[in-house]
Image (spheres, rainbow, N blue to C red):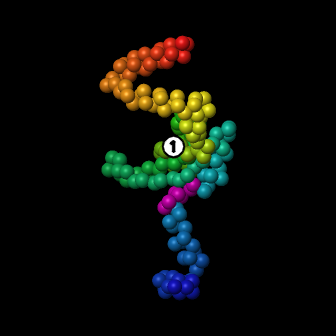
Amino acid sequence: MSKQHNIQNLATKYNSRLHISKLIEPIIKPLTKKYGVKVDELSMLWSQVFDDEYKNLVSPKKIVTEYRFKDGERKKYRKLHLEVSGTSAMEIEYRRNSIIEKVNEIFGHNFISDLVIKKKHSQNKINCNDSISDNYNSSQIFQTKYVAQAEKSETLEDALTKLGKNIKEQRRNENK
């Protein structure tokens, strides 16, 4: 189907002249379902929520609206989803109530009921094997893996005592 057929189908669907609002509505409706109603406004006013260094580390992703029945009444329950860099996630969790209060000051009383904090996946992951290989040669790495697999223990205490004995033996062998 061409674009012309799509426009004609929309015109016949609404039985009226084609208006721009009727064209835009089917495009915007899925986006509001996915990201929420006021996320774009919140992202523009985000510097008012965070006046300090956190405004670059935290970004609003979406606002999810749920309906819950409380005392026989249907009430809106909105959750703000935040994406936080891994280093500052605990600090944002600590400031949860102040963030909710500031967002509610901007949008009105009880606009946001809860926060969902998600950590950003960092792009700069360190390869564990590379950092180990810088300090030890490969024969030592495989030797320690073999020793650890050979001496499995049932309890943590047994494992720690065996590990301590192995370390003492290795130091004695190195000193000889």
Q: Is residue 111 magenta?
A: no
Quarter of the picture containing the C terminus is top right
Q: Outermost residue, front direction? A: 176
Residue 89, percent from left and from top: 55, 38
Element on which disc 1 rests? strand
What percent of the width, then of the height, locates residue 120? 56, 45
- Does the magenta run of residues contain 34? yes
Q: Quadrant of residue 95?
A: top right
Q: From where the camera sits, is residue 33 visible?
A: yes
- Residue in the picture at 35% in, 50% down: 69
* Image x and y of residue 76, in percent: 43, 52
Q: Is residue 105 visible?
A: no
For residue 72, above or below residue 4: above
Please, what is the three-letter code of the amino acid marked with disc 1? Ile
Residue of label 1: 117
The 10 Å Cα crowd at callout 1, few under 14, some 14 to 19, many 20 or more, is some
At x 49%, y 32%, the residue is 142
Q: Nearer the viewer, residue 125 or 72?
A: 125
The answer to which of 38 and 104 lies nearer the viewer is 38
* Magenta span of residues: 33-39
